[in-house]
Amino acid sequence: MPIKEALKTMRQQVDAGLEAVMLKPEGLLSDHIEAMRYSLFAGGKRVRPILCLATAQALGTNNAALLTAACSLELIHTYSLIHDDLPAMDNDDLRRGKPTNHKIYGEAQAILAGDGLLTLAFELLTSEKISNFLTGREQVRLISVIAQAVGSRGMVGGQAIDIASEEKDIPFSTLRFIHCCKTGALITASVQAGAIIAGANQEQFALLTKYGENIGLAFQIIDDILNVEGTAEQLGKAAGSDAKRGKATYPDFFGLELSRAKAGEAVANAVSALSGFDKRADFLRELAEYLLVRKK
Amino acid sequence: MPIKEALKTMRQQVDAGLEAVMLKPEGLLSDHIEAMRYSLFAGGKRVRPILCLATAQALGTNNAALLTAACSLELIHTYSLIHDDLPAMDNDDLRRGKPTNHKIYGEAQAILAGDGLLTLAFELLTSEKISNFLTGREQVRLISVIAQAVGSRGMVGGQAIDIASEEKDIPFSTLRFIHCCKTGALITASVQAGAIIAGANQEQFALLTKYGENIGLAFQIIDDILNVEGTAEQLGKAAGSDAKRGKATYPDFFGLELSRAKAGEAVANAVSALSGFDKRADFLRELAEYLLVRKK
């Protein structure tokens, strides 16, 4: 199946999974849950859940725990977008072509929608949907890997440095840190979550981690390039917004051409990490290549 | 030992535990970590960690997992205070007699300090400090109970309804819901966390849960009363702030006298839940009584 169709199928699978695990508007909590659902079902690409599913597939595993863990990754990603878009942060009015969460529900409810999504992710990660397939220790490890990736030494820390670095002349090492933490950590954890659920051995886990880290890097470089080159229509958000906010990007340091080459290099490193895996890892390989040609 | 001294000793134990588990300012993340530490070490009463420790003590257990779990409860409580104080929420300038987090670090960094503290709590809950004393399944249950208590059907949901109910004529059932979720859920979970770590049986767990629910209710009613009666100096925050923001309180529905009686009733129910426990539960009993006479 061509990659685009395969991605669409997996996206549909994730969307169905999200619908199954997500709270339904009810009673006093209706508005709060609507606010969470608004951003969760706003048409995301579901990259992180797909990476989780595809990694387990590369190891020959497919069970119900996987989709639950995959959904929790998307809940966390959605929370991070809602908080990043807030007026106090990136102050974005558009996300995926739609008004951002606080534009619809107000700042207070947007902050709480984010808080709720993050916490619901941990609820799901502790649920029987996962306990049924993992030992207690494995489940704790799964939660641990994800919590570490999205905390202060991961995603949250990356965002803190990103915000603090606006309008500042930062060295490349700081940009690298921001990318690694803000985007890379959750992408890597998505691959690791799939690996843990599939019972990867230590060597497989290390190789898949290397794949995840390089995918994360490529993903962020391409994001930077698209932010310079893309149109608002393609991106679903304001183009050139990084420059407008004085955010450093890969093209600032290396220009577009060299940035593209560095993304290519990261993809090559990701694919090479999989050289010992059989054809069940083909989807992970194609996904890596696809990152280079995506337009949004 | 008189209760006040015992509380002070336990508070010091919790503060030392928090210092041991909390991230230290370092490198790029210094400011972010400083922001988290500022609110964490702003002189909290440590009620939730103390409840966790005291519950395990009532069952004859004292191990290193307890203090770690207790600390994670305080991280979560601190995150909730930082987010609640934000301009978009309660817009408070003072907390525990000091400027609120966003007053010092700005809104963006305050939101991220909260996000970081919540996530660090889950990191701690998955750590070896706890794994060394619990089975994997027990540890997952511990995380699950806490995640459920502080998510959309608990603390976050309570805050969402609280904010949405300002300046509105709400029925008592809504106030009850807000109290149960916003304050009660984490207090109950603190007791439950101690019970799980101490290996409580099903009956003990149910009784301790009843204790926690009633303590939580009494705590919130007294909070409402103090907000009407207390001085800013006693409270460390603006007095009368509930009325100013059009927040419904117990005294609004029942007047001060009947509210005080209802708090007394909740404390009596809490104490009666412990009737089958031996003298190791005396501290929990005294703590419940103490709630009625506290002045801040």
Image (cartoon, coloured by chain):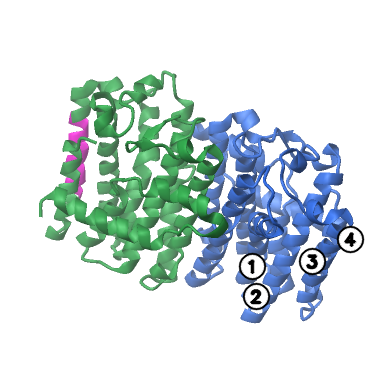
Chain colours: A blue, B green
Residue A189 on the magenta span: no
Marks 3,2: beta carbons within 8 A: no
Between tags 4 and 1, which lies in front?
A: 1
Q: Dot 3 falls on which chain?
A: A
Write the start and end of the magenta stretch as one range: B261-273
**Residue B250 horizontal/vertical position (percent):** 29, 26
Between tags 3 and 1, which lies in front?
A: 3
Between tags 4 and 3, which lies in front?
A: 3
Q: CA distance from mark 4 to mark 3?
A: 22 Å
Q: Earlier in the sequence, mark 4 or mark 1?
A: 4
Q: CA distance from mark 2 to mark 4?
A: 27 Å
Label 4 secondary element: loop
Q: Dot 2 falls on which chain?
A: A
Q: Are marks 2 and 4 on the same chain?
A: yes
Give the number of the disc on residue A192.
1
Marks 4,3: beta carbons within 8 A: no
Using a 10 Å C-alpha cutoff, classify the residue at mark 3 as few (fewer than 14 neighbours), some (14 to 19) or many (20 or more): many
Say which amino acid is labelled 2.
Answer: Phe
Which residue reaches farthest front?
A169
Q: Which residue is mark 3?
A: A266
Q: Which residue is mark 4?
A: A2
Between tags 2 and 4, which lies in front?
A: 2
Marks 1,2: beta carbons within 8 A: yes
Q: Are marks 4 and 1 on the same chain?
A: yes
Marks 2,4: beta carbons within 8 A: no
Say which amino acid is labelled 1.
Answer: Gln
